[in-house]
Amino acid sequence: RKEVEQDPGPFNVPEGATVAFNCTYSNSASQSFFWYRQDCRKEPKLLMSVYSSGNEDGRFTAQLNRASQYISLLIRDSKLSDSATYLCVVNQHSGNTPLVFGKGTRLSVIA
Amino acid sequence: EAGVVQSPRYKIIEKKQPVAFWCNPISGHNTLYWYLQNLGQGPELLIRYENEEAVDDSQLPKDRFSAERLKGVDSTLKIQPAELGDSAVYLCASSLRYPNTGELFFGEGSRLTVL
């Protein structure tokens, strides 16, 4: 099982739609979690951290389920500008490579 | 404040040739990372520095790849000789310290094409 797995995508959704991405992680000792956004041919940038109680930032909501070892990202009222690849990142806080990136899920929001 | 600066942005070389990438992290960031990103994949760590010390280079193919961060500031990643499979984007990132909050600041990357 890979350390961090994401929905393969691509997700093609119309403007205004709600879309959700899931990410599972294998290391139960992982303690912190993040979503990064990567635009086409650009560098990844931190979108939001994921807190145990769940957190919201405008149209974006991140949730963590430690028991099932997955995190999710919900985007409401999708905009064309949301089109990007969303990378799930897990900080294992141990081992040689504590920060592990998923492969990413590509989102295309269509007019 | 300037972000992470990388050069060159693009490089095309023939196989077996050497290539070097340079990275200048954000001022004051002690931790510097080199990542490899293939098309459709997430970034994969090659090496992580804490100041001038390489503290995690387990994923660096040491037969052909080398890196240095001599004064604990900027860094160079070298490939010699390059192979066709090395074609990818090489991303440099930095953060204030390790362990960190998870926020890495990435440069725009160096896109390598090996012919």
Image: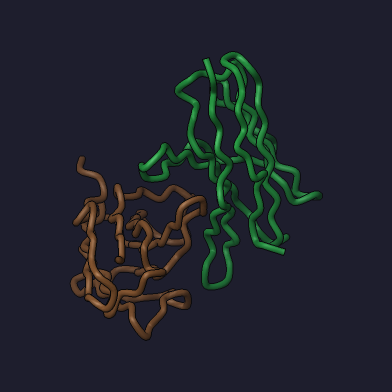
Chain colours: A green, B brown
Relative height, residue A13 to residue B95 (above, below) = above
Viewer-closest of A79 and B12: B12
In the image, what residue occupies the spot 60% across and 61% down?
A: A92
- Give the vertical position of B102 relative to A110 (above or below): below
Whether residue A7 sits left or right of residue B108 in the image: it is right
Quick one: which residue is furthest to the right in this view? A67
At horizontal 46% and vertical 52% (from top left) the residue drawn is B39
Q: Which residue is depicted at the point 28% across and 79% down?
A: B81
Q: Quadrant of residue B61?
A: bottom left
Task: Give percent across and percent down for residue B48.
Answer: 39, 68
The image quadrant where one finds the N terminus of chain B is top left
Task: Give residue B17's position: percent from left, percent from top.
Answer: 22, 76
One can see residue B27 in this view? no
Q: Is residue A23 above or below residue B52?
A: above
| Residue closest to the far front | B115
- Horizontal arrangement in the rendering, residue B80 relative to residue A61 (left or right): left
**Quadrant of the rendered image containing residue A2:** bottom right
Indicate left or right for B114 with B104 as reference: left
Q: Nearer the viewer, residue B54 or B114?
A: B114
In the rendered image, the vertical position of residue A96 relative to residue B4, given as above or below: below
**Is residue A2 at all visible to an observer of this figure?**
yes
Q: In x, y percent, where is residue B56?
A: 44, 74
Q: How many tags in the picture? A: 0
Which percent across, then down, holds residue A80?
A: 48, 20
Where is the C terminus of chain B found, in terms of image quarters?
bottom left
Q: Residue at x 75, y 44 (%)?
A: A65
